[in-house]
Amino acid sequence: MSGPSKYQPTSAVGKWFHERLPIVAFAKDHALDFPTPKNLNYWYTFGGILAVMLVVQIITGIVLVMHYTPHVDMAFASVEHIMRDVNYGWMLRYLHMNGASMFFIAVYIHMFRGMYYGSYKAPREVLWMIGVIIYLVMMATAFMGYVLPWGQMSFWGAKVITNLFSAIPFVGPEITTWLWGGYSVDNPTLNRFFSLHYLLPFVLAGIVFLHIWALHVVGNNNPTGISVKSDKDTVPFHPYYTLKDGFAIVVFLIFYAAFVFYGPNYMGDAVNYVQANPLATPEHIKPEWYYLPFYAILRSINNKLLGVVAMFSSILILLFLPWLDTSRVRSGKYRPIFKLEFWVFCVVCVALGFVGAQKPNDTLSWIGFLLTLYYFAHFIIFLPLMGLLEQPKRLPNSISEDVLAHSHGKLAAAE
Amino acid sequence: MKKFASLLIAGSALIGCAGLAHAEAEKDAKAISYSFEGPFGKFDKAQLQRGYKVYQTVCANCHSMKFVAFRNLADRGGPGFTDAQVKALAATFKVSETDSKGDTKDRDGMASDYFPSPALATIAGLGAIPPDLSLITKAREGWHGTFNQLLNNVGGPQYVYSLLTGYEDPPKGVAPIEGKYYNPYFTSGVWISMPPQLTDGLVKYDDDTKPTVDQMAKDVSAFLAWTAEPKMEERKQTGLEVLVYLLILAGLLYAVKRKIWAAIH
């Protein structure tokens, strides 16, 4: 955002206040007037959708806490108390539980959109990296939230994931004990997860603020990937994108509501309706769907430490994406080879999720291993090479030229 | 086409991974249907009342149901007993209470009491602790497969029905196990510690329904679907209102959005 503010206080009180805290000008510049490329498609609405989901999760979560008891003997029963005795408790709980899945659906679409249109490239590296950190914090938050109902999968999921830290050489077991607050997953573990699950969403809100700040410094990327060159390329955020995002948000809420009201337990694991029992291991321990690709990577390597390293690397490698992609063209639209490889990469990620959901066997382990190799090859080999070898298509001169070309094409087709 | 492909991939990404748990039982549950299925499905009150009777006469001897109180039997969207009936039903049970002097006394059950759990002596030596039944139809899957579960739900009530009616002689060559019963619908292996429970005419129904094994299994599994999800009717009703509201709002927003953007394109 550059240029002088268009805000002019009209009243004496407004002027007095503006000179002391220009918050109204700030809001007007950033929420209303912010110049936004006029060619953003619906894939670009997921940022707004994510902001809404964060707010939904925080509000439903705060009310749930008013009725929840973080104690190993009472947590499961208190969730059932919410479901049965609290007014609209079932709705709050199902909104929160499915809200987590919706949050991840939206964040995955948002991330893949960024990858396709090259939204991580200069000057948006910091914006992208803040996004990766948001994703990491989200994963930690969702993991700890899943433990709170204290069902069988809550308990055993917590046990498996915290046990990963025991793979750290020399100090692993001590770190695990420290994380647990004891010698097993028990009441202290539940209590600290509860505390952190309440804290982290507000940390998230803070990092989201940084994410939007970084966005407003460099401006939106757009489907052509070319930078904004003149006022003709942009429209003010309001009313153009408040309405477009607003419409997309409501459509997303319809999708969300369909699950909350008609299939609230579809995305969850039935075993989690059995109270946690440290003496009975479920037959098939698996995390929620949004972790499955990483779970597959973890299990694809036959060495605990290396598996853990691979799993964390698979996320942390995203931080280096801006420098791994050597192409000077941002948008995948003009990169014929990248475009193809991008979709292969998407399929690989979905396939990893599928493998992660299955009970392990020899064939699947091999498939998982090959998919893991591809996952890393995409970042370390294909992205750097494609940028050097590929001949990109001709770019339009400006965003507005591209928009005009498209609407002319439509007119010609209509005639 | 491109858009379609990307939607397809995004779509499969989000449902492709959910609910892929592997079949633990040897056979999928029998796909019988209930009145409460589908977006407009409701519980059949008479069926829930019969199911309650089967539960109290048969299941409750060994299984607890910790999260359901007698008062719930009169709740909206449930079996629809009247308050007077609930009081009478609760009073048929004795609840032991310790008073301020430390004396334990039995008193008649009240509507606010939770269903009494079976005495420890009854369940000792059964070979396995009978699971609590409050949530059993949500805690078990009748069948598997991402799309199957999306279209047909997870099949918890069908699981209970199939288990109750699914006892068989072990196939040839499979040696029987002492104290275990062969049931291919059982979630953990084919050998279950619970003997077959239902026989024709075991429970005397208050209406004209014939208490066959099949009928009792249907009724009690429907009752257990209600105990696991007592707010189901309220949920579906609210869902309809929410969806109608959101659809209208989406239509209005789309119309305004198109109008405003018309000059830009």
Image (cartoon, rainbow, N blue to C red):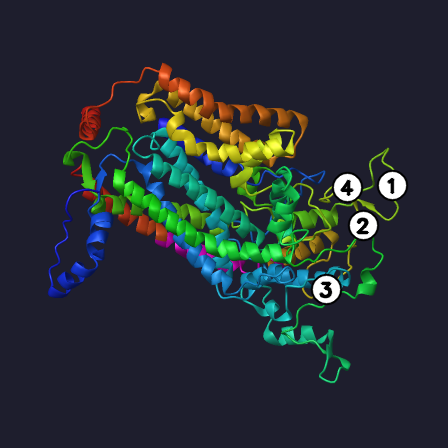
Which residue position holds label 2? B193
Report in which chain the residue with disc 2 lies.
B
Residue A187 visible to an observer of this rendering = yes
SS assignment for the magenta stretch, majority: helix
- Indicate which disc, 2 or 1, sits on the residue closer to the N terminus: 1
Split into 4 quadrants, where in the image is the C terminus of chain A?
A: top left
Which residue position holds label 3? B56
Report in which chain the residue with disc 1 lies.
B
Say what amino acid the circle numbered 3 marks: Gln
Q: Secondary structure at mark 1?
A: loop
Compared with A294, B142 (above or below) is below
Say what amino acid the circle numbered 2 marks: Ser
Say what amino acid the circle numbered 1 marks: Pro
Where residue B116 appears, as percent x and y from the top left, is 71, 68
Task: State yes or no: residue B132 in magenta.
Answer: no
Q: Are marks 2 and 1 in contact (CB under 8 Å)?
A: no
Q: Which residues lie in the magenta part? A: B227-245
Q: Secondary structure at mark 2?
A: loop
Q: Are marks 1 and 3 in contact (CB under 8 Å)?
A: no
Q: Secondary structure at mark 3?
A: helix
**Label 3 CA crowd tier, 10 Å (few <14, some 14–19, many 20+):** some
Say what amino acid the circle numbered 4 marks: Val
Report in which chain the residue with disc 3 lies.
B
Residue B39 visible to an observer of this rendering = no
Q: Are marks 3 and 2 in contact (CB under 8 Å)?
A: no
Q: Residue furthest bottom?
A: B101
Give the label on residue B176, or none: 1
Residue drawn at (58%, 61%) of the image: A70
| CA gap, disc 3 and disc 2 | 20 Å
Query: Do the dots labelled 2 and 4 sit on one chain?
Result: yes
